Image (cartoon, grey):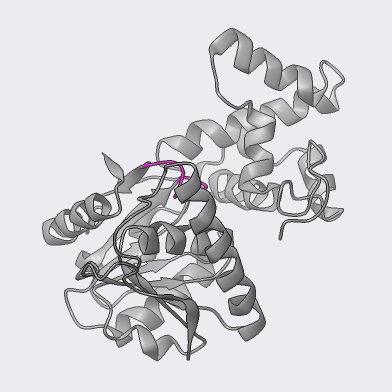
């Protein structure tokens, strides 16, 4: 287990938050959630299976903290949470809440949640940062389903301050209220929604992305024209294809597969162009190229 030497907690002597958040998975969303929490004075234990990934995550978090503060999206003054990184899942035992932020593959999420629920004390808030997998499906894997809720953080969470808070059929009222309270500490507005594949945002967004990619494949419009139409005609800040690049086209395909498998709706079957881009390693911003070019890998 190692600490980030540049984030040792309070920069001005102010007390940090009483929360200790564990984040499982040091990928794009895991580092983003970690950045958000640290910037709000919450201590974080960040877990991944690879020290190399954790080394990269510490660098990414430090850069994201600087950027979010520069943009005024996180407080410039006040306490900074302490970051501890580890490859040992057992190190989450003392957390007040645990966020699962691994790849959008249902069996992997279930495995991680099962292992976490066996380590933490009863009543510890368990959160799945899933974009599409139903919470009640994941609840089958945990020892105490009443402790599990979903929070679908937007990407990047340190810049977008609203999240879906998913109440599963077996989510206890205490867990929902604990999740509300945590989101408040994190400076997030939690919009409570019911359970189901894709919830609200991704049930709509992923199909829109899929259709936008089909339009490009059919030659009806190029990516820039598709996005310009959404931005200019509908007032969207970002068009569907630039949004897909930000999410990661690999993650888009994973989410579409979850939706297709669980709804049977052919509209969610990933289109050929998306599959081709993923097969080529063109995932979007994190690799430097997706529907648009970004000048090099940011992964």
| Image-based side of 228 in relation to 26, left or right | right
Rendered location of residue 137, percent (x, y): 39, 60
| Image-based side of 215 in relation to 122, left or right | right
- Residue visible at 79% across and 56% down? 297
Query: From the image, which quarter does the C terminus lie in?
Result: bottom right
Image quadrant assignment for residue 7: bottom left
| Image-based side of 209 in relation to 263, left or right | right
Image: 107 above or below 47: above
Pick the front one: 98 or 203: 98
- Residue visible at 41% across and 56% down? 36
Rendered location of residue 255, percent (x, y): 58, 49
Residue 98 falls inside the magenta stretch: no
What secondary structure prevails in the magenta region?
Answer: loop
| Image-based side of 176 in relation to 193, left or right | left
Rendered location of residue 148, percent (x, y): 28, 64
Pick the front one: 58 or 125: 58
Whether residue 266 is visible here, answered yes or no, is no
- Residue visible at 60% across and 69% down? 59
Pick the front one: 115 or 39: 39
Q: Which residues are magenta?
A: 154-161
Whether residue 49 is visible here, answered yes or no, is yes
* Number of marks in picture: 0
Pick the front one: 105 or 74: 74
Rendered location of residue 33, percent (x, y): 44, 59
Image: 265 above or below 40: above
């Amino acid at each position: 287990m190692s600490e980030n030497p540049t984030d040792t907690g309070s920069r001005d002597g102010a007390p940090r938050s009483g929360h200790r958040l564990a984040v499982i998975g040091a990928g794009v969303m895991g580092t983003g959630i970690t950045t958000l929490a640290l910037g709000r004075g919450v201590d974080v234990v960040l877990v991944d299976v690879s020290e190399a990934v954790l080394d990269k995550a510490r660098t990414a978090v430090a850069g994201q903290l600087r950027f979010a503060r520069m943009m005024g999206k996180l407080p410039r003054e006040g306490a900074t949470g302490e970051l501890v990184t580890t490859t040992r899942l057992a190190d989450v035992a003392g957390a007040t809440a645990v966020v699962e932020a691994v790849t959008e593959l249902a069996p992997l999420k279930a495995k991680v949640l099962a292992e976490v629920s066996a380590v933490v004390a009863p009543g510890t808030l368990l959160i799945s940062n899933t974009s599409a997998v139903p919470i009640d499906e994941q609840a089958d894997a945990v020892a105490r389903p009443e402790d599990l809720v979903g929070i679908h953080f937007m990407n990047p969470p340190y810049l977008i301050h609203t999240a879906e808070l998913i109440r599963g059929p077996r989510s206890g009222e205490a867990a929902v209220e604990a999740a509300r309270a945590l989101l408040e500490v994190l400076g997030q507005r939690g919009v409570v929604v019911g359970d189901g594949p894709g919830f609200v945002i991704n049930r709509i967004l992923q199909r829109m992305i899929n259709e936008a990619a089909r339009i490009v494949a059919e030659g009806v419009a190029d990516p820039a024209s598709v996005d310009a139409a959404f931005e200019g005609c509908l007032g969207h800040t970002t068009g569907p294809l630039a949004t897909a690049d930000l999410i990661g086209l690999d993650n888009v395909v994973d989410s579409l597969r979850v939706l297709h498998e669980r709804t049977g709706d052919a509209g969610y079957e990933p289109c050929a162009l998306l599959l081709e881009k993923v097969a080529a390693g063109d995932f979007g911003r994190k690799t430097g190229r997706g529907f648009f070019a970004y000048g090099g890998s940011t992964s």
